[in-house]
Image (cartoon, rainbow, N blue to C red):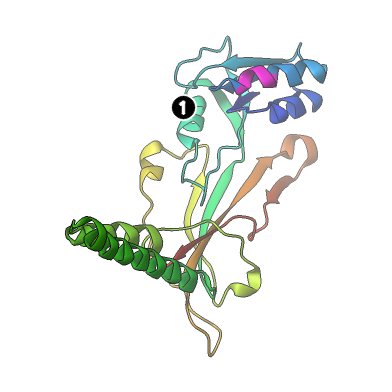
Amino acid sequence: VLDVGTGSGILAIWSAQAGARKVYAVEATNVAEHARELVRANGVADIVEVIQGTMEDIVLPEKVDVIISEWMGYYLLRESMFDSVICARDRWLNPGGVMYPSHARMWLAPIRSGLGDKKMEDFEIAMNDWNHFVEDTQAYYGVNMNALTKAYRAEHEKFYLKSSIWNNLHPNQLIGQPAVVKEMDCLTATVEEIREVRAQVTLPINQDRTRLAALAGWFDVHFRVCLAELFHRSLMFYSMEDTHYFPLTG
C-alpha cells in the first residue's frame, strides 16, 4: 500500500491493521516525524515505513497494489494534491492495482442564501471606510488619495463580489436540481484533464417565489472495487452529497 500525503499517518496505520503486508507512507512536510511517532505508538512500525519527501522525488523499493490518499481540496480540486497522486499512480501502481478513492464527482446547484447580500454589505462598508479615509487624508494632511479609488474599488469588487467562499449549507437551501460538472476515474485521470474544468450544465429551478442567490458546488468520492473473485459482488461507497459545499456567490 502507498499512502500519498500521509499527514498524521492514520490511513497508513489503518492499512496495516487491515492486513497490508507493507505500507509506504509518504509525507513531504515535517509532519512525517509525528507520523513515525504514531506508527510506533500503534505497534505497526514493522509494517509502515514513513518516507519524508515528495512523490516526484522519492524512490520505493517495489511497486504497490493499492494507493490511498486524502487528496481532495475545496470543491475537490482547489488546493488539492491530486497531481501528486497521479504521479504516484504512474510511477508505482502495479497493473491491476486499485486506488482509494477510485472515483470523484463535482456537483453544482442553484441555492437560496443570504451570503450574497452579506458580501454586498461588506463591500459597501469597505468602500465607505475608504471614502472616509480619502476625505480625512485630504482634510488633515492635504493629500488627495482619490486617484487610487478606482483601483481600490476594483480590488475589493474582486474580493467581495467576484470570488467564491466556503460555507456549510443545508440541503433545503437548494432550489433546483443539481448537476454533475465533472466526473473522474482516478485510475485514468490526467493532470491536463484537471488543470481546467469546463462544462455546460442546465440547472432548472423547481421552487416558485424564490430568488437565486448563488451557485453552490460540492463533491463526492466513491470507493469502487470489484471483488468478484472473493465475494462475487462489487462494492460501492458514497460520501454524502451535502458534506462539502463550496458556494460560488454572485
Badge count? 1
The boundaries of the magenta stretch are 31-35
Quadrant placement of the C terminus:
bottom left
In magenta segment, residue 34: yes
Residue 68: percent from the left, percent from the top? 63, 32
Residue 110 shown left or right of residue 138 in the figure: right
Question: In front here: 229 or 164?
Answer: 164
Residue 143: name its quadrant.
Answer: bottom left
Q: In the rendered image of this protein, does residue 44 appear above or below residue 105?
A: above
* Residue found at the very far front of the displayed protein: 140
Residue 8: name its quadrant.
Answer: top right
Residue 43 visible to the viewer: yes
Residue 88 shown left or right of residue 199 in the figure: right
Residue drawn at x 48%, y 29% as measured from the top left: 84
Quadrant placement of the N terminus:
top right
Residue 190: percent from the left, percent from the top? 41, 38
In magenta segment, residue 42: no
Residue 170 shown left or right of residue 159 in the figure: right
Question: In front here: 105 or 118?
Answer: 118
Q: Secondary structure at mark 1?
A: helix
Residue 68 shown left or right of residue 179 in the figure: right
* Residue found at the very far bottom of the displayed protein: 209
Tell me which amino acid carries mark 1.
Cys
Question: In front here: 159 or 125?
Answer: 125
What crowding class fits label 1: few (fewer than 14 Cα within 10 Å), some (14-19), or many (20 or more)? some
Residue marked by disc 1: 87
Q: Main secondary structure of the magenta part?
A: helix
Residue 21 visible to the viewer: no
Residue 133: percent from the left, percent from the top? 31, 61
Residue drawn at x 36%, y 62% as measured from the top left: 162
